Image: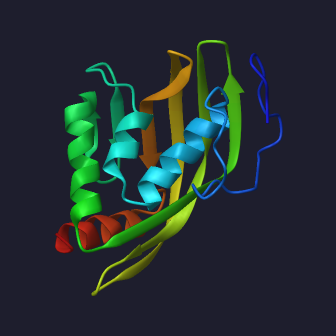
Amino acid sequence: MPGLGGMTMEPIQAPITGSEDYSDPSRPEHALRQFYRAFNGRDLTLMSENWWQSEEIAMDNPLGGIKRGWTEIRSVYERLFNGPARVYVEFHDYTLHVTPELFYAVGRERGRFESAEKKLELRIRTSRIYRISGGLWKQVHHHGSIESPELLAAYQSAVSGAR
């Protein structure tokens, strides 16, 4: 993993699932591991800890469009976490770009969506931006997109049908 002021030149293939140790909060990998632990564990409290609590943050993803501020972003996670469907993703094929004040991760998510009616294998291009705050990395921006129009339509339909 890169140190401050560095970047990974070769994409990292080992996935981040959230089950890894994340005992060093000063490391960018900690923030990514915490995010995937919160997401895959449907833990809204931990998810809230991962995001910077400000109206300046933004998320753009296939389910919620563009959401600004924690209140709007939280509503997307609440809907997903409290619904009957299960979504699991892991981050892989990524690079880290680190400065003393922020880092961004650019890569891919793979995973699955499962409901009583539908199962989908997910493939999502993903970028996340974090800034340092009080010695901890806090997410300030996320962008995710599904390349396949067919998969995007199936995923959006499945999630709206699973409410």
- Report the residue at 56% width, 18% height from top: 135
Vertical arrangement, residue 134 with respect to residue 38, above or below: above
| Residue 109 lies in quadrant | bottom right
- Report the residue at 28% width, 64% height from top: 156
What is the x, y in percent for residue 97?
Answer: 69, 27
What is the x, y in percent for residue 55?
Answer: 25, 21
What is the x, y in percent for residue 51?
Answer: 40, 32
**Which quadrant is the C terminus positioned in?**
bottom left
| Residue 41 lies in quadrant | bottom left
Vertical arrangement, residue 64 with respect to residue 90, above or below: above
What is the x, y in percent for residue 96?
Answer: 69, 33
Q: Is 136 left or right of 12, judged from the image as shown?
A: left
Query: Residue most toward the bottom?
Result: 117
Which of the two residues, 13 or 75, is positioned nearer the viewer here?
Answer: 75
Color scheme of the displayed model: rainbow
**Which quadrant is the N terminus positioned in?**
top right
Which of the two residues, 106 or 130, is positioned nearer the viewer here?
Answer: 130
Q: Is 77 left or right of 131, judged from the image as shown?
A: left
Query: Residue most toward the right?
Result: 10
Vertical arrangement, residue 116 with respect to residue 71, above or below: below
- Report the residue at 66% width, 50% height from top: 21
Which of the two residues, 71 or 8, is positioned nearer the viewer here?
Answer: 71
Vertical arrangement, residue 140 with respect to residue 22, above or below: above
- Report the residue at 71% width, 38% height from top: 95
Q: Is 145 left or right of 111, judged from the image as shown?
A: left
The number of numbered discs placed on residues in the rendered structure image is 0
